[in-house]
């Protein structure tokens, strides 16, 4: 079906990026990460995490304002790029001897970028990008991918930490993995994700249709050229 394939690729890629970009596991395992960074004591680690959650809430509220003034696509590209930078800085912090306060600040800002963009906007885009005729089934597939990737991300984070700790005596590699995923996500969104701000659902559906028809014509043109080549 013209355009549906492209919409489904975006509808699967966005929830996968939402879970694998690192925002959720960093928030979930924040007390453990803070303890690894040198914030000793359960009370101190949990208290720092509580502050992180409060700041994250502020950025979610900010997203509600910015999404209609800046747009979905610019906010996603900027924030996920900032997440990649934050992950690289965290990798440097854990590779060297960095103050726990700096680690706490960088980790908080990195998770805030997730809550400013991909975490809430993933749901917004999923509600907007699918043509009406497939929206119910497509949303079901996207939700399955989102929660499936969330389970994998949550389950594998401690395993990744253990792997890099055993092999390299540092958990810095975990953040490098997240940074690379964010960079790939930015490339994916730049090439595939349209701006939906100010567009009706019909206009978005028609844009997928036009892209699908253009892709079909391009393929048909390529086959036609192959058929006319002299033997």
Image (cartoon, rainbow, N blue to C red):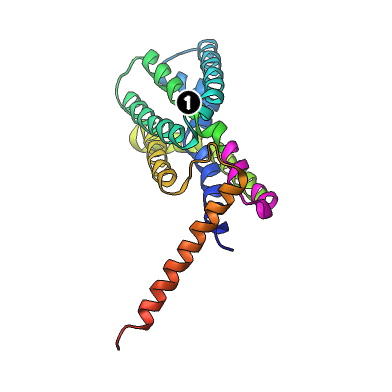
* Secondary structure category for the residue under label 1: helix
- The quarter in which the C terminus is drawn is bottom left
The answer to whether residue 36 is seen in the rendering is no
Residue name at image x 53 percent, y 37 percent: 197
Residue 50 against residue 27 in the figure, above or below: above
Number of residue marks: 1
Residue 64 against residue 222 in the figure, above or below: above
Percent across and percent down for residue 13 are 51, 47
> Residue 134 appears in which quarter of the rendering?
bottom right
Residue name at image x 40 percent, y 78 percent: 224
Residue name at image x 29 percent, y 23 percent: 96
Q: Main secondary structure of the magenta part?
A: helix
Percent across and percent down for residue 71 are 49, 33
Percent across and percent down for residue 98 are 32, 18
Residue 196 against residue 39 in the figure, above or below: below
Q: Nearer the viewer, residue 35 or 103?
A: 103
Residue underneath mark 1 = 111
Percent across and percent down for residue 80 are 43, 34
User: Which stretch did the figure color magenta?
Assistant: 123-139
Q: Nearer the viewer, residue 42 or 6?
A: 6
Characterize the local packing of mark 1: few (<14), some (14-19) or many (20 or more) Cα atoms within 10 angstroms.
many
């Amino acid at each position: 079906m013209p355009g549906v394939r492209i919409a489904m690729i975006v509808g699967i890629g966005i929830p996968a990026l939402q879970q694998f970009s690192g925002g959720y596991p960093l928030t979930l395992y924040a007390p453990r990460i803070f303890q690894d960074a040198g914030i000793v004591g359960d009370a101190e680690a949990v208290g720092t995490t509580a502050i992180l959650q409060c700041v994250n809430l502020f950025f979610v509220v900010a997203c509600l304002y910015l999404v209609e003034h800046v747009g979905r696509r610019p906010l996603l590209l900027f924030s996920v790029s900032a997440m990649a930078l934050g992950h690289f800085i965290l990798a440097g912090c854990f590779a060297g001897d960095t103050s726990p306060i700096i680690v706490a600040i960088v980790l908080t800002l990195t998770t805030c970028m997730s809550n400013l963009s991909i975490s809430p906007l993933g749901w917004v885009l999923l509600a907007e990008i699918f043509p009406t005729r497939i929206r119910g089934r497509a949303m079901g597939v996207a939700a399955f991918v989102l929660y499936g990737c969330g389970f994998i991300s949550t389950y594998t984070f401690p395993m990744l930490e253990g792997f890099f700790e055993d092999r390299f005596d540092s958990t810095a590699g975990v953040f490098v993995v997240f940074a690379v995923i964010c960079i790939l996500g930015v490339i994916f969104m730049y090439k595939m994700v349209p701006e939906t701000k100010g567009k009706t659902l019909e206009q978005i559906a028609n844009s997928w249709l036009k892209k699908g028809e253009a892709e079909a014509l391009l393929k048909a043109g390529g086959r036609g050229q192959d058929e006319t080549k002299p033997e």
